[in-house]
Image (cartoon, rainbow, N blue to C red):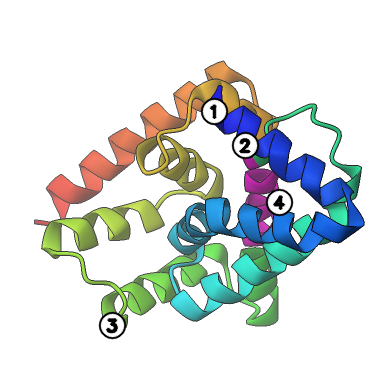
Amino acid sequence: MAIQAEDEEILSKFREDKTRNEAFNMLLKKYQQKIYWHVRRMVIDHDDADDLTQDVFIKVWKNLPGFRNDAQLYTWMYRIATNECITFLNKKKQKNNISLDDVDYELADTLSSSDQFTGDQIQRKLQEAILTLPDKQRLVFNMKYFDDMKYEEMSEVLGTSVGALKASFHLAVKKIEAFVTNTD
């Protein structure tokens, strides 16, 4: 597998002091966009997504020496990014002393007013529908729909069974369909 071989090269270079920075630059080049868009779909706001993506890669830099190869490199980084998003959303909820529903409304407002969001009306409606989902369903839907992740990979990232993930995705799709058809 070319992806695995490339990851092995990155990890091998990272273990050597003299090639560590080069390896990290390779890692950034390969995964930064994917991680950014995963984070962005969860937190909506570009500036928050940018900050969180930096935080993710700082954690990757600090923890990569302990990476044990028991998961794919991308899956491991995806897990870090997912945890950062959940922590961020929970802090936002606690800081503002508001419910997660209110955070979701705030995110929807951000989506509507964002000049970085260039989607058409259908895409905006889809994003608004996704924001009505509970965090876990939103994560599962984003991972499957946007990132085209296999359920087995999602299971590694989220620590949830494949069956539960399939059920979450199915429920998310039903809720999104209901949202879109009821808000025309």
Residue at figure coordinates x 76%, y 63% from the top left: 21
Q: Nearer the viewer, residue 50 or 88?
A: 50
- Contact check, label 1 and label 4, Cβ < 8 Å: no
- What distance separates the C-alpha of mark 3 from that of mark 4? 28 Å
Lower position in the chain sequence, tag 2 or tag 3? 2
Q: Residue at x 42, y 41 (%)?
A: 147
The question of residue 19 being in magenta is answered with no
**SS label for mark 1:** helix
Q: Earlier in the sequence, mark 3 or mark 4?
A: 4
The residue that disc 4 covers is 80
Note whether 146 is above or below 99 in the view shown.
Answer: above
At label 2, counting other C-alpha atoms closer than 10 Å, the crowd grade (few under 14, some 14-19, many 20 or more) is: some
**Amino acid under disc 2:** Glu
Q: CA distance from mark 2 to mark 4?
A: 20 Å
Q: Main secondary structure of the magenta part?
A: helix
Residue with the mark numbered 3: 115
Q: Residue 29 has which mark?
A: none
Displayed quadrant of residue 6: top right
Disc on the earlier residue, 1 or 4: 1
Q: Which residue is mark 1?
A: 2
Image disc number at residue 6: 2
How packed is label 4: few (under 14 Cα within 10 Å), some, or many (20 or more)? some
Residue 54 seen anywhere in this rendered image of the structure: yes
- Label 1 close to label 2 by CB (< 8 Å): yes
Q: Which residues are magenta?
A: 74-87
Residue 98 falls left or right of residue 103? right
Amino acid residing under circle 4: Ile
